[in-house]
Amino acid sequence: MEEIRIEHLSKDFDGFVAVDDVSLTINNGELFSFLGPSGCGKTTLLRMIAGFEAPSKGRIVIGNIDITDIPPYKRQVNTIFQNYSLFPHMTVFDNVAFGLRIRKTPKPEIKDRVGEMLALVKMEDQAFRYPDQLSGGMKQRIAIARALINKPKVLLLDEPLAALDLKLRQHMLIELMNIHDAVGITFIYVTHDQGEAMSISDRVALMNHGKIVQEGPPDDIYERPQSIFSAYFIGETNLITGEVIAIEDGFMQLKCPDGNGGSFEIGSTFHFAQVLGRELTVSLRPEKIAISRSKPRVQDDVNMLRGTIEDILYLGTHTQYIVRVGALRFRVFSQHKRVYFDDKALDWEEAVWLFWHNSDSWLIDEIQDNETSATEPPDGGVNHYQRSTKRPTKV
Amino acid sequence: MKRITASRFYKGFNLTAFSLVMTFLYVPIVILVIFSFNDAKIITGWRGFTWKYYAQLWQNDIIKQAFRNTMLIAVLSTLVSTVFGILTALGLQNKKFSGRKLISALIYVPLVIPDILMGVSLALLFNFTRVNTGMFTVLIAHITFCISYTVIVINSRLEGFDYSLVEAAMDLGAKPGYIFWRIKFPLMLPGIIAAALLAFTLSIDDFIITFFTSGRGFDTLPIYVEGTIRHGTITTINSLSTLMIGFTLFLVVITKRMRKVLISAL
């Protein structure tokens, strides 16, 4: 087993703690991502694994070898840099052959292996061009070939797609997954883009302020966030604060103030022990909420709220509604499926019903500071909601 | 309409200014080259074509000695000041080196000090330390003022250096020495060549500092030229200058060609 073990790793830059006591095991052959906002320590962590930064505390072990004090040029780890860092004075061929030449590989072997690598990244016909004659996507491929030719045990990728445009990014993401399947080594991927991390990774470690906030498969982090930060950083969510007023047979009832002096009740399943009177936060993903003009048929395990549409944002794949309930604003995503359409499209300032299943109310054992808005982001979160200023004329 | 007149005015102004600059820069040189072939003792008018003064140049042992001296000083001071320039610039890039601000300020000073001050102060120093003036003192003086230029040229090249390339090379298994010769040095090379060229021309060209540090018996070309003009015979000077212009042009063209060859060879 060539697993990577990170043990109590810390990095202190003159009093600024970039990485704070991180422990973690990355399995052999895994595609593992570190995800977090800028300044969360993910790149520092990667640089410590590569050997460019010496940890202040802790150890890094690959297989049975402690690599903490081994210089970068002796580690069986290779890196894809954010700006590719191709050597500008060398051809594509010489760039890719760089690692082999250091190891004094015989010439015919160099030729064969560089050819193989260029074929892997589909750049066979570019061997004698210089980096400044290549596009961003091509440079990216050469950087991958240059790293993989050394047969590393681990490939580190530092925001590798950040410099590419959207279409190319999506394309390279699939390409990266294919390359990962082809070579079968461990990939450690660092990104601030949750979409990238979610789609590519076997497991994700979400980081904030130098610590790992949550780690697990992408769907686990998305569906079962353990903190307000996790819930908010990955995807979008509605956060509602409430007090436990009833517990019964795996279900519970929360009383939530609506910010206008009134309150409403939310039913929920729960995944940790509950006490009456305790304050909690409910994370409710916008796509789990259904929206309708007419009142749905009542079921026991469905939550229902009455609200007013404040804003409608048509986004192609779905429409985002901002619905006011008391002083709270709920974000609701509704897909354009015929079955969901009312006979007439929903309109601004229209009274609507919001409803969702009890088990979609996900409980988080934390309290938001700001209780007035369901969509207010916590510290470090990003508020994607911007009120549109243009209102279409009513039909 | 007004805008068109304004732009026309600027166009006219630009053209005039450009022509004037070009005239003052190149007309004297062209005249000098033409008159080096003029069969007359003084520049009064065209008296027919001749190679005479080039032949005289070839026969003049003092000129040949001065030329050899100039070349020797130029080559040696270029070599030494370029090597020192590389080392100093690399040192100045080391962020852990605490004195680098002071050193770089000290390096810049000779650029703004008048040559005459530098010449006199060096002459005083040599006098004070009782070093016999001659080739050695001229060499020391030339290295001294050339270093300022080489450091600045090479340092500015290093300022734009992308250090992630060093990390990338290290990541791929290269040790520091290998990284220097395969990555850093080739990428510095254009700067090094430019620095060497600058040092070379500065050294060939220098009169004032050389004048104060050479003493009797060690003449470089500028010193010889000045001495000769003082005695009133300028005919060989024209041909000598023409040769120097040709040599400099040759040097510039060669280095431009060589740069590409050198970089791809490394």
Image (spheres, grey):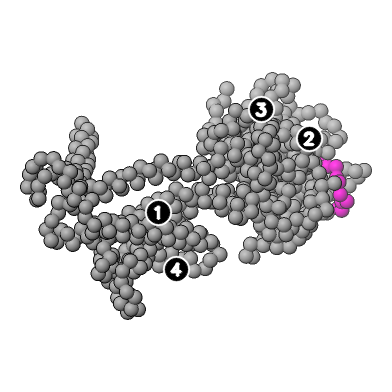
Residue farthest to the right?
A249
Q: Is residue A310 magenta?
A: no
Co-location on one chain, circles 3 and 2: yes
Residue B226 occupies quadrant: bottom left
Ranked by sequence position, the earlier of labels 3 and 2 is: 3
Residue A235 occupies quadrant: top right
Disc nearest the viewer among 3 and 1: 1
Label 2: chain? A
Q: Which residue lies under the disc numbered 2?
A: A356
Kind of residue at badge 2: Trp
- Give x and y (percent) for residue B101: 46, 66
Label 4: chain? B
Disc nearest the viewer among 3 and 2: 3
Q: Is residue B226 above or below residue A338?
A: below
Co-location on one chain, circles 4 and 2: no
Label 1: chain? B
As rendered, which of B25 and A274 lies closer to the eye? B25
- Give x and y (percent) for residue A39: 63, 53
Quadrant (top left/top right/bottom left/bottom right) for the C terminus of chain A: top right
Q: Secondary structure at mark 3?
A: loop
Q: Which residue lies under the disc numbered 4?
A: B102
Label 3: chain? A
Residue at screen point 77% across, 41% down? A185
Kind of residue at badge 4: Leu
Q: Which residue lies under the disc numbered 3?
A: A317
Residue at screen point 43% across, 64% down? B104
The stretch in magenta equals A262-276
Q: Residues within 10 Å of mark 2 (few under 14, many from 20)?
A: many
**B44 left or right of A154 in image:** left
Q: Is residue A169 above or below residue A244?
A: above
Q: Residues within 10 Å of mark 3 (few under 14, many from 20)?
A: few
Kind of residue at badge 3: Thr
